[in-house]
Amino acid sequence: MNVILEDVTKYYGSKLVLDRVSLTIPEGGFVALLGPSGCGKTTLLNALAGLTNIDGGTIKAGGVTWSAKGYNLVPEERKIGMVFQDFALWPHMNVFENVAFSLRLKKRPSREIKAQVAEALATVQMKGYEGSYPYQLSGGQRQRVAFARALVVRPSLLLMDEPLSSLDAQLREKMRWEIIRIVLGAGITTVYVTHDQAEALSLADHVVLLNQGRIEQAGSPTQLYREPATVFAANFLGCSNLLEGRALEVRGDYSMVLCQGLKIYTSGKLSPGQEVEIMIRPADIMINTQSQGPGASLKAVILQRSFQGVNWQYRVALEEASNIQLEVWNTQEMAVADIIQLWLPADRCRALSGVLENYQSEYKCANL
């Protein structure tokens, strides 16, 4: 079932929470709604679920209008499954009773209930736990039961509201693989709300980045990470180095940008005099290597370092502009105070629109 949102608008009092959001969710697609607290992602999920009315626009699914101004199809008629952040399991019911609850409300035959509960529990690998109570289960097992309860109704649309946020880091990693297995196996159209960029990039085939109730950028995980359209997108979707500059000239398929006296090359054609932010990911900066193609060669000194298992993370200051500090990731181990040569490939430098709020330093890393 494909879902189409057109100009969806929502106010809480005088505050605009969703600002004309338009989005198509293809049948069988896995869409992540990503963004900081207060960006509107949970409100949008609740609108899809029918838990909140909208003040403008429409939500349609399979050609049927679900929501419009003054109209809201009730949740039980939308054929959706929902997984909540806190599991929301009944503590006085065992696993079977928790999963069967919605089917019993619909007064389904006993034989049908048993068959569908068994199928749902097998899908999440919880067969044999039917008689267990929530307090007897681990966090990961409780989350699996929550998934089974959402799947048991055989939904056309699965909605998940930060379902892994209450789990520890190691269990979250494990459950990501489980979500991929469950969702791909079931082939259900899925919308997943998260503020965690790693979850969005690793789980979804389409990421929608929200900012202040609007869609900042939407596309595949690789598109958003490698080709952010704005400063906000670059910072929220990973660690990025940002350099303010002004375009000087175009040279073939590349542009030269002057950043505090440094000549940086970026792919794409800019207008001379155009003010931009040049973004480059820490892993895309090469250290002590021969230049290959257009780019900028800069000498730097290592100020700090941090070992992250696979890579070393270095904070470096540029020799020609010591007030500019960059984040650089590399597998080579080097010492603080070492002098190194950086290579910034032009095809990895991207010119961005937008202004970085409260700009205080030359880099901003979302995961540090």
Image: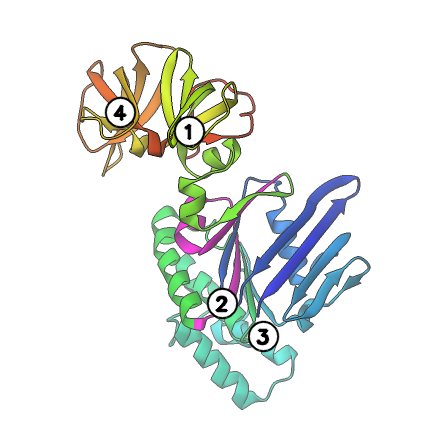
Residue under label 1: 279
Residue under label 3: 101
Q: Marks 2 and 3, Cα distance to the nearest angstrom? A: 26 Å
> Of circles 1 and 3, which is in front?
1
> Of circles 4 and 2, which is in front?
4
Colour approach in the figure: rainbow
Q: Marks 4 and 1, Cα distance to the nearest angstrom? A: 14 Å
Residue 16 visible in the snapshot: yes
> Of circles 2 and 3, which is in front?
2
> SS at mark 3?
helix
Amino acid at circle 2: Gly
Where, by quadrant of the figure, is residue 363 drawn? top left
Residue 60 appears left or right of 171: right
Q: Residue at x 68, y 73 (%)?
A: 77
Residue under label 2: 28
Mark toward the start of the polypeptide (4 vs 3): 3
Amino acid at circle 4: Trp
Q: Nearer the viewer, residue 184 or 228?
A: 228
Q: Using a 10 Å C-alpha cutoff, classify the residue at mark 2 as few (fewer than 14 neighbours), some (14 to 19) or many (20 or more).
A: some
Q: Residue furthest right?
A: 70
Image: 192 above or below 269: below
> SS at mark 1?
strand
Q: Residue at x 56, y 29 (%)?
A: 354
Image: 364 above or below 201: above
Q: Position of residue 9 (x, y in %)?
A: 72, 49
Task: Tell me which segment is drawn in magenta.
Answer: 186-211
